Image (cartoon, helix red, strand yellow):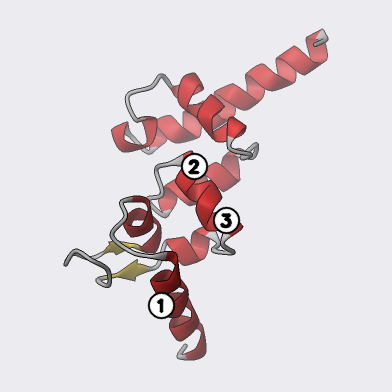
Amino acid sequence: MNDDEEFARAELLRSIGEVIARHGAAALDRLAPEEAALVWIEAGFEDSEEVDEWLAARCFSALGAQRLERAGITPQQAAMRTQAGTRDYEETIGYKIINDDLSLEEARRIITNAFWNS
């Protein structure tokens, strides 16, 4: 890795780490900001704005965000609030999926229903 690539990598870690730190302890998951940033980068998220969108949706797991993205769910859709799921509390779709309180199928139904009824 040359100096420019090392600088770019360090800058990416710093910028994503700052975003994660702004979202607090749940987003950091007991890691230092740059360590948490590395987890997100390794999951394929190399844009601090995109990481910020997933975290704003209360999707605090990089692998969970990756799973949602692969399922075709956007951060904006993951940010939708719902009481649906296996446990009775209101939270975002992303949060409930990450915590195994909502299935992807049920999330898709909620998202589709919101789209067609808006």
The residue furthest top is 3
Q: Name the residue under label 2.
A: 63
Q: Which residue lies at the image location 48% right of the left edge and 20% below the top edge?
A: 35
Q: Is mark 3 on a helix, strand or loop?
A: helix
The CA distance from mark 2 to mark 1 is 22 Å
- The amino acid pointed to by label 1 is Ile
Q: Mark 3 points at which residue?
A: 69
- The amino acid pointed to by label 3 is Glu
- The amino acid pointed to by label 2 is Leu
The CA distance from mark 1 to mark 3 is 16 Å
Left or right, residue 7 beside residue 37: right
Q: Which residue lies at the image location 58% right of the left edge and 44% below the top edge?
A: 49
Q: Residues within 10 Å of mark 1 (few under 14, many from 20)?
A: some
Q: Name the residue under label 1.
A: 110
Q: Horizontal and vertical percent for residue 57?
A: 42, 55
Q: What element carries label 1?
A: helix
The CA distance from mark 2 to mark 3 is 10 Å
Q: Which residue lies at the image location 32% right of the left edge and 58% below the top edge?
A: 96
Which of the marked residues, 1 or 3, is nearer the chain's N terminus? Answer: 3
Q: Which residue lies at the image location 47% right of the left edge and 73% below the top edge?
A: 108
| Quadrant in which residue 60 is drawn | top left
Left or right, residue 33 beside residue 12: left
| Quadrant in which residue 78 is drawn | bottom left
How many badges with numbers are in the image? 3
Left or right, residue 91 beside residue 88: right
Q: Horizontal and vertical percent for residue 103?
A: 38, 65
Per the rendering, the mark at residue 99 is none
Q: Is mark 2 on a helix, strand or loop?
A: helix
Which of the marked residues, 2 or 1, is nearer the chain's N terminus? Answer: 2
Quadrant into which the N terminus falls: top right
| Quadrant in which residue 82 is drawn | bottom left
